[in-house]
Image (tube, coloured by chain):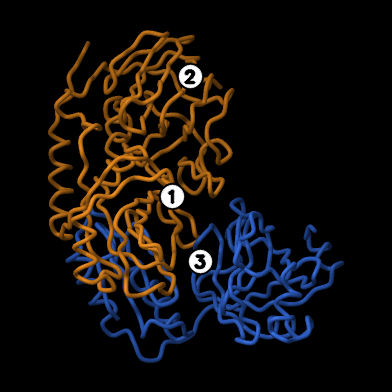
């Protein structure tokens, strides 16, 4: 683990060798829950991501020397094998050219049939590596390299809520209508972010996600809108 | 329910409190006042809690009508304050009566004004805060900027008439040097690139909003294009492929993948956000230790300021 200054009241911790892996992600997750306890009363917030953890502290309560010392003491023994925690969350997905306007292009580029793309995407178990960009936006990885696809050269002005999308080796479900440059391959009727629900999101960082293909009728039945 | 009615909403007037804290893990940003210092003075002058809900008035054009007897104060940028058409002093508490019209006109210097009322506006919290983040449709009234006809609920109140002595008010027309703590991917910027960054003049562009301020000047090029997406703190300065720095602010996205040279201290993001496009700025490197000292000195100094009584 490497600690760098991020800002006036923030340090950033880097784990592993700077690449994406479930083991490194599990370390980030473990560090997050340990530091939540050992920095209690000094923390403003934390942002766990793929291989890093941003620690934002309260300048009125502490300084970077104290926070660094506590991080070192708490995480000194961290490393080696870390248990992979988190639950598996199943998300229904209506894959089709109707609900996924980029599905056909993506299949063509990958030299696969549309059904093969759907099979590959829904057969993998993805890890929630990070949540950010927008409320409830969960970065899931990693997508099978056969169906990995670069972002669109011109982002869409309006991606619908629930869009199941791929960018490089990442996949996600858009939590709200927003602009976006990811490749859209289907729609998920489960709300990824509902400010009025508790919990507000069906997943947390460290959980695993599996997509379950559903029909158009099932999608509508589950409250999906086309 | 009564309080203040919005007669004219102005260009961009947002309901803000201290910000939405502790929800980064579901992707929520903080929001809150861009110029924290001016926000805190507004509440202190009225004897409000330091987190009380106020209006952040960008550029100006706001007119409210009081429906209750209360008191108001306007701090921050130089937006001319008028009550019933008569110009009044800013940084100074003014009693208002039901029927009075309160106006924050167009700014002559400084882009953001903070209009506070005694006791604060009573706005429902979402995720522990009233701060409006339009990008997330959260906070304020329905997650949006003020609109004509909105009602801002407040309680009638009488408070002492206090004013902040002039020598303690910021000068928004002064040149600004913005202090930056090197950090994050600073090692991806060579000594030459760093020297260029800290010795050149940059211009505030019109692509400057509550998410970030894009600056224009000599191109600086990091040795890496992108990084694995990671947490972004307030004031972080990211440098995309075009080499033009973007200072990330209150409504920033919580994670991102552009290299960052470091972060601007909050005192100076507050000053920068008062600038309009075309303004010139320069950067100065500061150590994290010096930044902490500066923070404490400023806290101490403002705590010692005695407000003048006009009663």
The foreground one among B214 and A13 is B214
Q: Which residue is mark 2?
A: B64
In this rendering, position of residue A184 left or right of residue B210: right
Q: Where residue B153 sits: x, y (%)? A: 51, 25
Q: Identify the mark at residue B211; answer none if there is no mark.
A: 1
For the point 69% across and 58% down, the residue is: A160
Q: Is residue A146 above or below residue A30?
A: below
- Dot 2, how many residues are within 10 Å of its Cα: few (below 14), some (14-19), or many (20+)? many
Is residue B311 shown left or right of residue A104? left
User: Which residue is identified by label 3?
Assistant: A131
Q: Chain of mark 3?
A: A
Residue B113, quarter of the rendered image: top left
Mark 3 falls on what kind of element? strand
Point out residue A170 in the picture as x, y percentages from the top left corner. Answer: 57, 76
Q: Which chain is blue?
A: A
Disc 1: CA contacts within 10 A as few (<14), some (14-19) or many (>=20): some
């Amino acid at each position: 683990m490497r600690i760098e200054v991020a800002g006036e009241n923030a340090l950033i911790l880097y784990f592993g060798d700077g690449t994406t892996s479930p083991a490194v992600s599990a370390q980030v997750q473990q560090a997050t829950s340990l530091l939540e306890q050992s920095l209690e009363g000094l923390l403003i917030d934390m942002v766990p991501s793929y291989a890093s953890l941003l620690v934002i502290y309260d300048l009125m309560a502490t300084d970077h020397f104290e926070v660094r010392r506590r991080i070192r003491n708490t995480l000194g023994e961290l490393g080696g094998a870390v248990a992979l925690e988190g639950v598996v969350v199943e998300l229904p997905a209506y894959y089709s050219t109707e609900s996924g306007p980029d599905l056909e292009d993506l299949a063509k580029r990958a030299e696969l049939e549309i059904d093969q793309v759907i099979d590959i995407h829904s057969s993998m178990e993805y890890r929630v590596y990070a949540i950010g960009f927008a409320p409830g936006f969960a970065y899931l990885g990693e997508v099978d390299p056969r169906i990995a696809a670069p972002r669109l050269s011109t982002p869409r002005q309006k991606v619908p809520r629930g869009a199941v999308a791929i960018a490089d080796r990442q996949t996600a479900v858009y939590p709200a209508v927003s602009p976006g440059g990811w490749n859209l391959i289907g729609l998920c009727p489960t709300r990824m972010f509902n400010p009025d629900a508790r919990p507000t999101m069906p997943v947390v960082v460290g959980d695993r996600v599996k997509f379950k293909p559903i029909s158009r009728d099932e999608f509508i039945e589950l409250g999906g809108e086309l | 329910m009564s309080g203040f009615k919005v007669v004219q909403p102005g260009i961009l007037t947002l309901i803000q409190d201290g910000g939405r804290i502790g929800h980064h893990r579901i992707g929520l940003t903080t929001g809150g006042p861009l110029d924290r210092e001016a926000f805190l003075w507004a509440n202190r002058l009225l004897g409000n809690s330091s987190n009380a809900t106020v209006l952040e008035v960008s550029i100006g054009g706001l007119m409210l009508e009081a429906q209750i007897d209360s008191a108001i104060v306007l701090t921050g940028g130089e937006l001319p304050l008028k009550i019933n058409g008569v110009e009044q002093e800013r940084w100074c508490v003014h009693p208002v009566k039901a029927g009075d019209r309160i106006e924050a006109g167009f700014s002559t210097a400084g882009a953001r004004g903070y209009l506070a009322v005694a006791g604060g506006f009573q706005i429902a919290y979402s995720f522990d805060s009233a701060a409006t983040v339009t990008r997330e449709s959260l906070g304020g009234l329905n997650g949006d900027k003020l609109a004509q006809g909105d009602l801002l609920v407040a309680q009638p109140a009488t408070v002492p008439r206090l004013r902040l002595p002039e020598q303690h008010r910021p000068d928004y027309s002064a040149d600004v040097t913005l202090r930056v703590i090197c950090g994050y991917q600073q090692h991806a910027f060579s000594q030459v690139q760093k020297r260029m960054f800290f010795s050149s003049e940059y211009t505030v562009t019109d692509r400057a909003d509550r998410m970030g301020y894009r600056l224009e000047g000599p191109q600086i090029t990091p040795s890496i294009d992108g990084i694995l997406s990671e947490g972004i703190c307030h004031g972080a300065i990211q440098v995309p492929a075009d080499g033009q720095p973007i200072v990330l602010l209150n409504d920033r996205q919580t994670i991102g993948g552009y290299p960052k040279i470091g972060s601007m201290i909050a005192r100076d993001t507050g000053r920068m956000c008062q600038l309009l496009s075309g303004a010139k700025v320069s950067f100065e490197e500061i150590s994290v230790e010096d930044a902490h000292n500066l923070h404490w000195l400023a806290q101490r100094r403002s705590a010692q300021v005695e407000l003048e009584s006009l009663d």
